[in-house]
């Protein structure tokens, strides 16, 4: 299952760089990584804060990748699933320790 989550992250970077002009795969990965670290620290962020970190087109496209979800009732952005959150905890917290 974690392999599926890893593949979803790779696909998200590719989709973002292909569908949003002037965003390279590395820039896309950096945007995603920055958001992951913020969500791991805070659990969720406000919709407004989410779009303050990137342009609207990038933000919308990133939500389409199903890494993250917009919860309409609370107007918060969080991980799309528990699996995605667990994958990020394992993968990205390990990287931060090195």
Image: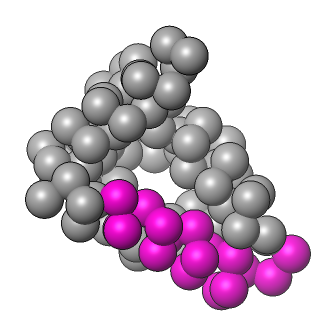
In this rendering, would 42 be left or right of 24?
left
Main secondary structure type of the part rendered in magenta: helix
* Quarter of the figure with residue 39: top left
Residue at image x 68%, y 48%? 30
Q: How many marks?
A: 0
Residue 60 appears in view = no
Q: Is residue 32 above or below residue 4?
A: above
Residue at image x 41%, y 23%? 93
- Residue 33: say if magenta: no
**Nearest the camera: 42 or 31?**
31
**Nearest the camera: 80 or 45?**
80
**Nearest the camera: 4 or 77?**
4
Which image quadrant: the N terminus? Answer: bottom left
The percent position of residue 22, horizontal first and vertical second, equals 86, 75
Query: Colour scheme in the image?
Result: one colour
Spot the residue most to the right. 22
Q: Which residues are magenta?
A: 6-22
The percent position of residue 24, horizontal first and vertical second, equals 79, 69
The percent position of residue 29, horizontal first and vertical second, equals 63, 55
* Quarter of the figure with residue 44: top left
Spot the residue most to the top. 97
Residue at image x 46%, y 38%? 36
- Residue 18: say if magenta: yes
Residue 23 appears in view = yes
In this rendering, would 7 be left or right of 57?
left
In this rendering, would 98 be left or right of 58?
left
Residue at image x 46%, y 45%? 47
The percent position of residue 50, horizontal first and vertical second, equals 54, 44
Spot the residue most to the bottom. 19
Which image quadrant: the C terminus? Answer: top right
Q: Is residue 42 above or below residue 26?
A: above
């Amino acid at each position: 299952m974690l392999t599926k989550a890893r593949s979803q992250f790779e696909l998200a970077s590719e989709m973002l760089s292909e569908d949003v002009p002037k965003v390279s795969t590395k820039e896309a990965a950096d945007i995603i990584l920055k958001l992951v670290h913020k969500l791991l620290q805070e659990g969720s962020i406000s919709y407004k804060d989410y779009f303050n970190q990137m342009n609207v087109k990038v933000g919308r496209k990133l939500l389409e990748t199903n890494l993250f979800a917009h919860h309409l009732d609370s107007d918060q952005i969080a991980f799309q699933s528990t699996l995605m959150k667990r994958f990020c905890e394992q993968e990205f917290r390990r990287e931060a320790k090195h």
